[in-house]
Amino acid sequence: MRKLILIFISFMFSYASEIYVAAAANTTYAMPEIIKKFNQKYPDVKVNVILASSGKLTAQIMHGAEYDVFMSANMKYPEFLYKKGIAKSKPKIYAKGAIALFSIKNIKLDNFKKALLNAKSIAIANPKTAPYGRAAVEAMKNAGIYGNVKNRLIFAETVSAVIPYTVNSADIGIVAKSSLFSPKMKKYKNFADVPKSLYKPINQGIIMLNNKKDTVKFYNYIFSDDAKEVFKKYGYIF
């Protein structure tokens, strides 16, 4: 199964052991720093991160993917795996994610409703598999504009893929706020928070899929002050 995985984040030096972490795509930019700091404390553990939508990762786990830790973009999927007896720890919130509007065009984004109503195309993550996509749809529905804009939506497989969609074609993207803190995004200045009153907090959940020593080390580290500071740096809330 691992041979089918497309994206790995790893560090090229000698390790005594390794673990595989299945992580929601919204963590793309924070995870390299998380792993770097983890390896400062545990230099003998190689961490391989597989990034995809939470729904896709859950399906892979259900079909036997040998991951050690699952970091989901919401609590739904970890809770499902826990009820199925696959998770070895009870689902726990490790951070809360937020969504934001982003555009490379000269479009005012300070008014969520007005900005989307005036946009010809809007990129969001696929709401069928990506919690950030569902949050985007929820915000549009609560703003009373979903019916007006649903035919203008462009769906990306993951929330991290919304960025290139927006850069290359869509007028506006509804992205994970964490993506705005990527070094690659510094050249772009046009973004705005989506009002938190329009969607439920995105409680991101983590579970262990086995009780290996290094699995436990990484799981516990995610709740450390060091890891929390990294998540805050990338726009997550607690």
Image: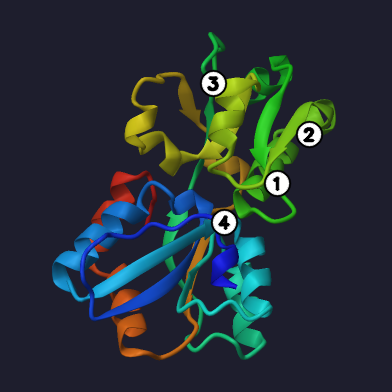
Q: Quadrant of the N terminus?
A: bottom right
Name the element at disc 3: loop
Query: Where residue 29 appears, x then y in whole percent?
Result: 38, 46
Cα separation between marks 4 and 2: 26 Å
| Label annotation for residue 47 | none
Name the element at disc 1: loop
**First reached walking from the N terminus: tag 4 or tag 3:** 4
Instruction: Check contact, mark 3 vs mark 1: CB within 8 A.
Output: no
Q: Amino acid at mark 4?
A: Ala
Q: Is residue 194 visible?
A: no
Which residue is depicted at the point 53% across and 64% down?
A: 72
Q: Amino acid at mark 1?
A: Asn
Instruction: Check contact, mark 3 vs mark 2: CB within 8 A.
Output: no
Q: Which residue is mark 1?
A: 126
- Give the mark toward the camera: 4 or 1: 4
Q: Nearer the viewer, residue 180 or 165?
A: 165
Q: Amino acid at mark 2?
A: Tyr
Q: Which residue is mark 4?
A: 52
Q: Which residue is mark 3?
A: 103
Name the element at disc 2: helix
Instruction: Check contact, mark 2 vs mark 1: CB within 8 A.
Output: no
